[in-house]
Image (cartoon, helix red, strand yellow):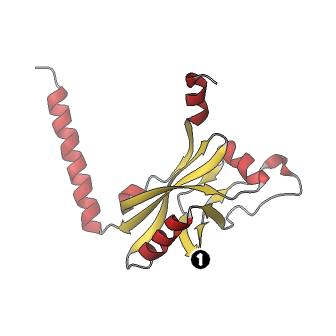
Amino acid sequence: MSTDSRKRADSRQTLATNPKARHDYHVLQTWEAGLVLTGSEIKSIRAGKASIKQAYGVVRGGEVWLEGMHVAPYEMAGYAQHDPTRSRKLLLHKHEIRRLIGAVEQKGLTLVPLDLYLVRGRAKVTLALARGKKLHDRREELKRRAMEREVARQWSRPR
């Protein structure tokens, strides 16, 4: 296999993002996790019919689960349909799960999915350990971005 075809095979194809995650949370650390899916779910995800806007991670029984992710039913599945909002198990290494268990037990930390993508045909999710932002933090960030845009606009003007 040549390096060009290997690059194409390893490339990420982003299918769903959580745009409010970085707005509502301070991202402390991220992990890449695989998803345990049924056949109709992966086909629906490949068709781009998934949403992680309302999703969050939960540590339950020494395993990490993704709750609230919506995967639309696959039209061609027939009788073997899946529940669109069922809990989906995340695949992580044991040492990563142990670290997550310790971190999530701290006050104010949560697991938030940032994006859903395909790598070599397998569905992956970027999971972030995050702390919720206060209202004044969000307002300050909006003001900072507006000022940065204004400065960039001033510098890009022809003289």
Relative height, residue 5 to residue 126 (above, below): above
**Which quadrant holds residue 135?**
bottom left
Which amino acid is tagged 1?
Arg
Q: Position of residue 88 (x, y in %)?
A: 66, 64
Q: Where 109 sits versus 140, above or below?
A: below
| Residue 46: percent from left, percent from top | 68, 43
Residue lying at 39% horizontally and 60% vertically, measured from the top left: 29
Please report the residue visible at 42 percent of the width from the left and 64 percent of the height from the top. Answer: 129
Classify mark 1: residues with Cα within 10 Å, few (<14), some (14-19) or many (20+).
few
Residue 145 placement, left or right of 86 = left
The quadrant of the picture occupied by the C terminus is top left
Under tag 1, what secondary structure?
strand
Q: Which residue is mark 1?
A: 60
- Image vertical order of residue 3 relative to residue 84, above or below: above
Which quadrant of the figure has residue 134?
A: bottom left
Most extreme residue toward the right is 79
The residue lying furthest to the top in this view is 159
Depth check: 143 or 32 in front? Answer: 32
The quarter holding residue 120 reads top right
Residue 95 percent coordinates (x, y): 51, 66
For image coordinates 84% across by 46% down, the residue present is: 76
